[in-house]
């Protein structure tokens, strides 16, 4: 039996680095836009980088809360601001899915026993767990549930 829970979290430093970099670019373009009033398109660049900075800085603050937790009882995942949990005995399937093209990162997919609920949690470069580590951790916990 595993005593420690397996957790997947966002990499807070990566999110903070991207967010601060995007904020710096937004400020630089904002300064240029105020000096060159005839180049209105610069404000679009400022807005895009400001939104990018906001999203990533919120992600950095949110990195303290796990996205996915697996222990000897089952798994819990964040679904928006809520949590969903499935016991090992009630689980139909759990799998680690690889990257699909450039749009879909690797993820952990959990299907309830009756197939009515499907939950996913991201894994990969922006999180603290790799797909290979997730496969090993989940296989050992599912076996420990002995069903």
Image (cartoon, rainbow, N blue to C red):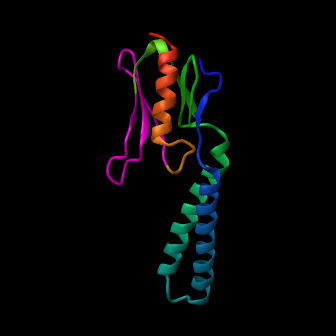
* Residue 5 lies in the magenta-colored region: no
Q: Give the image quarter of residue 9.
A: top right
Image spot of residue 109 (x, y percent): 41, 31
Image spot of residue 12 (x, y percent): 64, 51
Q: Residue at x 61, y 37 (%)?
A: 66
Quadrant in which the N terminus is drawn: top right
User: Closer to the camera, 54 or 110?
Assistant: 110
Q: Residue at x 37, y 42 (%)?
A: 98
Is 61 positioned to the left or the right of 129 in the image?
A: right
Quadrant in which the C terminus is drawn: top left
Q: Give the image quarter of residue 63.
A: top right
User: Closer to the camera, 91 or 80?
Assistant: 91
From what the image shows, is residue 130 above or below residue 43? above
Q: Residue furthest top?
A: 147
Picture mark count: 0
From what the image shows, is residue 110 above or below residue 88? below
Is 121 positioned to the left or the right of 83 in the image?
A: left
Image spot of residue 38 (x, y percent): 51, 89
Image spot of residue 139 (x, y percent): 46, 25
Q: Residue at x 54, y 68 (%)?
A: 49
Q: Residue at x 63, y 72 (%)?
A: 24
The residue segment tinted magenta is 95-124
């Amino acid at each position: 039996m595993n005593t420690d829970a397996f957790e997947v979290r966002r990499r807070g430093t990566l999110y903070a680095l991207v967010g601060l970099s995007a904020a710096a670019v937004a400020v630089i373009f904002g300064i240029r836009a105020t000096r060159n009033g005839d180049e209105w398109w610069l404000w679009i660049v400022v807005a895009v980088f400001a939104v990018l900075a906001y999203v990533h800085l919120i992600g950095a603050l949110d990195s303290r809360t796990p996205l996915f937790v697996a222990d000897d009882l089952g798994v819990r995942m964040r679904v928006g601001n809520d949590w969903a949990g499935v016991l090992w005995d009630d689980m139909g399937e759990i799998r680690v899915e690889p990257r699909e093209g450039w749009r879909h990162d690797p993820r952990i997919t959990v299907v309830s026993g009756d197939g009515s609920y499907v939950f996913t949690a991201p894994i990969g470069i922006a999180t603290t767990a790799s797909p290979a580590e997730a496969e090993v951790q989940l296989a050992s916990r599912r076996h420990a549930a002995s069903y």
